[in-house]
Amino acid sequence: MTHHPGRLAGMDALRPQLKKPSFPISEGLRAYLRRYRRERALPITYERLRRFSEAAPLVDAAGKTTLWESVVYDRLDMESLNEDLKQVYASIRVDGDLSVMRHLYVDRVDFCAFGNSAPFRIRIVNAFNDNADYYYVKRADASRVYGLELEHLLSPNRLNYLTCGSTLVEEHIAGLPGDVFINRWLDNPELRPIRIAKELVKFNERCFVRLLGDMRSYNFVVVVTPDFESAQVRIRAMDFDQQSYEGRMNFYRPQFFLDNQPLALFCVQHLNVDSARQYQREEQVLMLQRAAIIEDRLAMLLDAMSGDALAPDENVRILRESLAQHYDRSEFLTCRSMGSLVRESLATLRVRMNGQPRVDAVAFD
């Protein structure tokens, strides 16, 4: 299916209709996290960080107020809290070996009440060279955990995160926010337009196949890497709250969001249909190859996901009917959960790669 540029005007209707609820981690998912060492005993919990005593608005480099606040804790708690925060950082970076991180210190703890996860952001600084890094502490939401793990398994990006009961710890995903990239970098002469358009197609396809929704421009980042022939780009999701929740099929295709309209038009301008199909198929093959390498692990994850209620039944019904029509594949109609829809989406790719009619959704075209 090709999408005429004139249809892009309706993209502003694609936004979450209701705030997504948080889903607890089930026993099936917890077993998976333990099996693959994602579940650890940690000295910090989300609830402990909520017990701050003061907060002040955080401003950016231009002096503008951000959505974040810097928080302060009781002086008697600060010393032990700082050590525990360093220990958590060591857990996600060097498997808990604090001996190589004695020179680090906690520079700041920020809190953001915006969004589903209401995260804390921890700023860690190297005392020798002032190099800073970040990580996040959030409430553990099953949707987000499934999103993180599917990204880790099926995308070219590896993710470090840990859970501890109802607490989720995530590494920082570095890159240019999508909206900043659109405004400042999209027309940069140092970047080859074809490389950008190709990566947009691949990103769009990854989101659609594994049903990661709400990839508006501020929910992904663009990583620019200098190369001997201009720069390479890669798009990385950084918000996984909307993993397999919405019922609208196009909610899982970044091309249809109004925020991403400049990117969609950019692809229309620089790619023809045959090239878009080529790049889409390349990403489908890569996803299947990744899935084959970790077949048992992915099967355990999807078993747990298929048994979890991650969305209202109505959302599941609407999405399965849309996918069945889109792929002309009735097997989607037997799915009873979002996890089973993700499993069937991957199964559909396997069938199509074995000589059946090709997938016809051309991303960003």
Image (cartoon, rainbow, N blue to C red):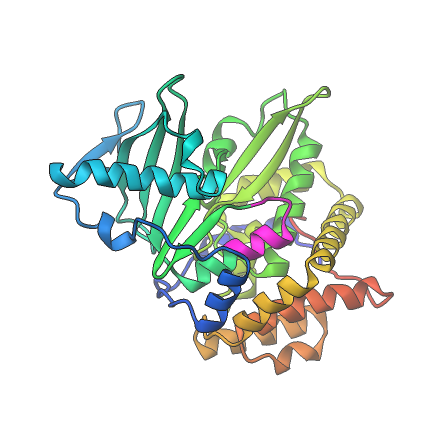
- Quarter of the figure with residue 140: bottom left
- Quarter of the figure with residue 104: top left
Give residue 340's position: percent from left, percent from top. 59, 73
> With 24 as the anchor, is 79 left or right in this view?
left
Outermost right residue: 355
- Quarter of the figure with residue 54: top left
Q: Nearer the viewer, residue 313 or 105?
A: 105
Give residue 116's position: percent from left, percent from top. 34, 56
Magenta span dominant secondary structure: helix
> With 301 as the anchor, is 30 left or right in this view?
left
Q: Which residues are magenta?
A: 148-158
Is 155 a magenta residue? yes
- Image quadrant occupied by the N terminus: bottom right
Which residue shows up at 64% across the image and 69% down it? Answer: 343
Give residue 297's position: percent from left, percent from top. 63, 62
Residue 20 higher or lower than 221, as above or below: below
Q: Mark yes or no: residue 68 visible.
A: no
Which residue shows up at 44% across the image and 52% down it? Answer: 162
